[in-house]
Amino acid sequence: MQTINTNNHNLYFNRRTNLLDNYLRIRAATEEICRPLEIEDYVVQNIADVSPPKWHLGHTSWFFETMILIPYLEGYKIFDPNFNYVFNSYYETMGARVIRTDRGNLSRPTVDQVYKYRAYVDHAMTKYLENPIPEDLVPLFLLGLNHEQQHQELLVTDIKFVLGNNPLLPTYSDTSLEKGTEILEQSFLTFREGVYEIGHQGNDFCFDNELNRHKVYINHFEISENLVSNGEYLEFMNAGGYNNFRLWHADGWEWKKQKEAKSPLYWHFIENEWQHYTLNGLSEILLNQPVTHINMYEAYAYANWKKMRLPTEAEWEVASQNLNWGERWEWTQSAYLPYPGFKMAEDATGEYNGKFMVNQMILRGASTATPDGHSRTTYRNFFQPHLQWQFTGIRLVK
């Protein structure tokens, strides 16, 4: 895992001759994320949005088995017919599945069985990729690799939620994984009103929700070069930002009251000072680091307090070439909606993004948990506005 702040990250996905090397490298990276875990950590599911590490390991293998090996590798024998029910996520095309909230009840299959499943799938995929695959299958294969990388980031955030809600607040790693660029001051870049183009272009990989490239009209705006820091957000807290309903969306204020929220996720007020849980354990809050683990409601309230706003996703993309980005997923004020001309595929891959285009907000950029090679300026991440467990941050517009 590393911070990414440029937009040319698809290079090794474009070289068809390296498909096997990329497959093995990305699959190994998933298991490396799980290496520090104890066996008990693999099954915990604290909330519906967090999946157990064991499920991620199985689901990413299920994707390759179901989408590629079963239909395209002659003579392939399914590892376990029950795994389609256990590891299918949301694909109605693929049949019945364990409901999301029950993934933490899966004490079986065992962790050892899941790793054997991964090895079985990897052996078959290696065999399949030793020879050139049909050209029209390459996009599906690349989708599988990018799908695995998405789950690598989810693994990191889910593991942090599992350990960060353990009363002992155990350390995941001694290596610093969350530190970002030191923020010393805020400056703003100016963009003139006019017609701009956004959306993916070129022949390298992108998700279907990044298409089609299209024109947008944008009014004059100024956008901050840097993210909001912990120190700046602490000023908002100390000024009573969590107690002033006028700063919040109505839904956000209801969330605040229900959760009795007073700070970002993982912050703890101990002996008259704020500390926060990180993947390195409980530590002091570095005031010049980017604030993280806030939801859209909190980001909106903070922007209101500063008498500014969040960017639209079009503004963010237009400005992105001039921004320092890649350390936090950045909330925008844009709803997750289809671009002009967007079409869902007729097969199972059509369920990947399109059916979630309701009640979600767009985030742009990447985070310190985003795998190398998995970010670009057109990437459209999306989550519900109340969720905090991703590495999310704030960039302001005025």
Image: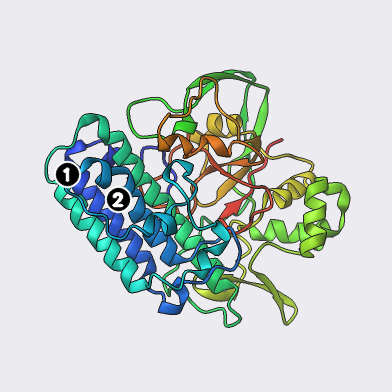
Q: Secondary structure at mark 1?
A: loop
**What amino acid is labelled 1 in the image?**
Glu
Labels 1 and 2: the sequence-earlier one: 2
Which residue type does callout 2 highlight?
Glu
User: Could you say which is closer to the camera, residue 371 or residue 210?
Assistant: 210
Residue 232: name its quadrant.
bottom right
Compared to 242, does 299 lie above or below? above
What residue is disc 2 on? 65
**Front of the two marks 1 and 2:** 1
Measured as percent of width and height from the top left, residue 169 is found at 56, 78
Q: How many marks?
A: 2
- Whether residue 172 is visible: no
Q: Residues within 10 Å of mark 2 (few under 14, many from 20)?
A: many
Q: Position of residue 177 (x, y in %)?
A: 45, 64
Image quarter hosting the C terminus: top right
Picture coordinates of residue 187, whole percent (x, y): 63, 42
Q: Is residue 225 visible?
A: yes
Query: On the image, numbered disc 1 is attached to which residue?
Result: 74
**Residue drawn at point x = 57 percent, y = 39 percent:** 356
Residue at 88%, 48% in the rendered image: 246
Q: Which mark, by number, is residue 57?
A: none
Q: Secondary structure at mark 2?
A: helix
In the image shown, does 398 or 252 lie closer to the viewer? 252
- Tag 1: Cα neighbours inside 10 Å, few (<14), some, or many (≥20)? few
